Amino acid sequence: MNLKPPKEVVAVLVLLDAKMQQIIYQHQHQMRLDRFLSNELKIPAVLVQKLVRTGKILLNSCKTQANCRLNNQDCITIFVNISANKQANTATKNIGLAQNPVQIKNFWQNVIYEDLNIIAINKPSGLSTQGGTGIAVSVDDFIASKGYQLVHRLDKDTSGILLIAKNKQWGNWLTEAFRHKNISKKYLAIVIGQVKKDQGTINIPLAKKSIGKNDRVMPDIDNGKEAITEFVRQKVFTVKGNFYSLLLLKPITGRTHQLRVHCKELGNPIVGDVKYGGITAKQTAIANRLCLHASEIVISNYCNGEDLKITAPMPKFIKDLVF
């Protein structure tokens, strides 16, 4: 029996004027605000998060957080003309993409799996998943014209498997699968130093904090959210007399920058992760990029009760260094 996608989220849109609108959430499932608006309005989740942060989106007339859970009959007020901004941005980006067919061709060559419901790409390091300030083009720009939908994200500098839903129904299904931990992921990382244990579990709660104009994820035992990562040491090797370790990382939870912060707290920051590992993490003898690669995704009970396993090839520079 084929697995059927869940029913779509139901909402009522009330237009107040050209620059203001309200959405009445009508569903028993408590969906995250940013994910709901991203799906409903077909805009990047990062834009929703920015609008919430700047007070342009209110929940029941009050300031809120982008990751809050919606309840039935909640009233979302948006103080910006989403349609006009979205059309302008889409038009500008589509012109740029239309003028660069080589870029489009190169992007779709990254597809490593496709069926009637989903696509998986092997996202290159340096390509953003979604648009934002200073981002010329993103994965979202390439897939929007086809009506496809992102269901999760990878950091710009992280390479590897990124799932894309071919329609809204399967977008909602995959979002729910992630929420219920029916999708598991594994990553490869090259870290600085010799990791002493063959395997282990890092269990350190994390919280996002503002430092100046920047947001950083930091350990917070008292107020942080649960964050758990399992690791297996694959190999220890040396380059120019310095030790490095190749780790297989399995995030049990899915916090922002979880793997990067956990490796730093382990005492072995990921090569290229200057944000959390400091200037010593810049190791040009290894690579001029963040050495983190999403290597495997398993979707439980995908169709006919069977699991779907998708793997991304190991980056060539890792193969050359380690094997």
Image (cartoon, grey):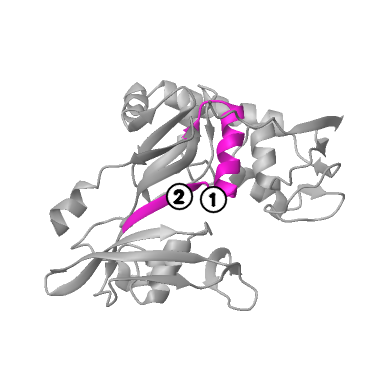
* Residue 184: mark: 2
Q: Position of residue 277 (x, y in %)?
A: 38, 71
Residue 301 lies, with reference to residue 142, above or below; the image says below
For mark 1, give the secondary structure. loop
Residue 306 lies, with reference to residue 315, above or below; the image says above
Which residue corresponds to the image point at 81% horizontal and 49% vertical from the top-left?
Answer: 59
Which residue corresponds to the image point at 16% horizontal and 59% vertical from the top-left?
Answer: 322
Which region of the structure is painted magenta? 164-188
Residue 178 lies, with reference to residue 26, above or below; the image says below
Q: Is residue 61 left or right of residue 188?
A: right
According to the picture, the residue beneath numbered tag 1 turns out to be 181
Q: Nearer the viewer, residue 158 or 101?
A: 158
Residue 42 lies, with reference to residue 126, above or below; the image says above
Task: Evaluate whether residue 126 shows in this view.
Answer: no
Q: Nearer the viewer, residue 233 or 46?
A: 233
Q: Nearer the viewer, residue 96 or 146?
A: 146
Amino acid type, mark 2: Ser
Q: Position of residue 299 (x, y in %)?
A: 46, 41
Amino acid type, mark 1: Lys
Which residue corresponds to the image point at 37% horizontal and 60% vertical from the top-left?
Answer: 249
* Residue 143: mark: none
Task: Evaluate whether residue 72 shows in this view.
Answer: yes
Q: Position of residue 68 (x, y in %)?
A: 72, 54
Q: Position of residue 146 (x, y in %)?
A: 50, 21
Q: Find out whether the residues at labels 1 and 2 contact each other: C-beta distance under 8 Å.
A: yes
